[in-house]
Amino acid sequence: MATSGALPVVDLAPFFAGDDADGVARATEAVRQACRTHGFFRAVNHGVPAQLMARALELSAAFFALPDEEKAKVRPAEGSKAPLPAGYARQPAHSADKNEYVLLFDPKLGFNVYPAEPAGFRKVLEECYANFTKLGLLIQEILNECMGLPPGFLGGFNSDRGFDFMVALRYFPATEEESNGLSEHEDGNCITFVIQDGVGGLEVLKDDEWVPAEPVDDGSIIVNIGDVIQVITYTALFQERILLPVTHIATRIHLHLVISTCMLLVDHVGFGVCTHRC
């Protein structure tokens, strides 16, 4: 298993080949080991077009560059029944986390609020959502195998996609008085995907040291195993804590896709949870 930007790298190509059982077995073992040791890995050859992800980051940056009054037009709709407010929001001034974001759910649910500008923003984000969801279900199947469950068992317990969401975030530049990014935390869901621009910012706590997940221009997707996987395996799959650090003086754009909770308990697989910061 290779490493890139301090994270293990897993090549998912065998899962798309259709006739590479040995390759699938090796890739599954690589995921298992990455989950045991880091709780994070970089997925390559994952099936999501690199150009699509780059365009999503580009259009997200263009949206966040709009005047505040334009972004405010994409505020969450009043009375929405979405699990979380869908649309544009900004962290309050007193929050330790300094960012603004656009949050969306599965477009089929009808919760999302989209801006008129920049052109193509809605189309690209919806394409990203569809691609990330497809990849998330594949990762879930791989984790199912890693945990020694019957085929499709985990998917049966986590089949409701109504709580999955994707969020485009802009982290404000740090100042002498204020930090930026997210405080250290563990993700409380099942799986999180992260793509970040060239500024980067993601750090992973590994062996009591903060290790930067440096931006790598290879089209890879960072995969984070959440608290739910830790709980259902009795801490056998390891998730590091994460944080977005405070030192960046430049604006940063990230895109996250969150695969929601599954309720299931599995004995003695050996996975755990990871603290991180952004």
Image (cartoon, helix red, strand yellow):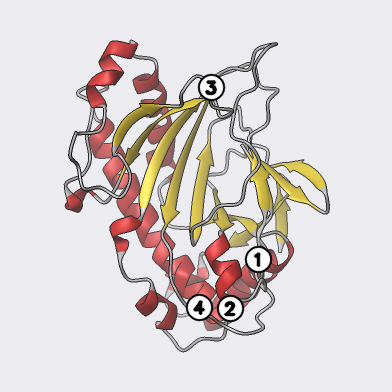
Tell me the kind of residue under disc 2.
Cys
Which of the two discs, 2 and 1, labels the residue nearer the N terminus? 1
Residue ID for mark 4: 144
Residue ID for mark 1: 35
In the depicted structure, whether residue 191 falls above or below residue 250: below
Side of 117 where 64 appears, left or right: right
- Where in the figure is residue 230, as x and y percent of width and height? 60, 68
Q: Quadrant of residue 215?
A: top right
Side of 167 where 36 appears, left or right: right
Q: Element at badge 4?
A: helix
Side of 149 where 205 appears, left or right: right
- Where in the figure is residue 269, as x and y percent of width and height? 65, 80
Mark 1 or 3: in front is 3
Tell me the kind of residue under disc 3.
His
- Where in the figure is residue 1, as x and y percent of width and height? 71, 64
Report the number of numbered marks: 4
Mark 3 or 4: in front is 3
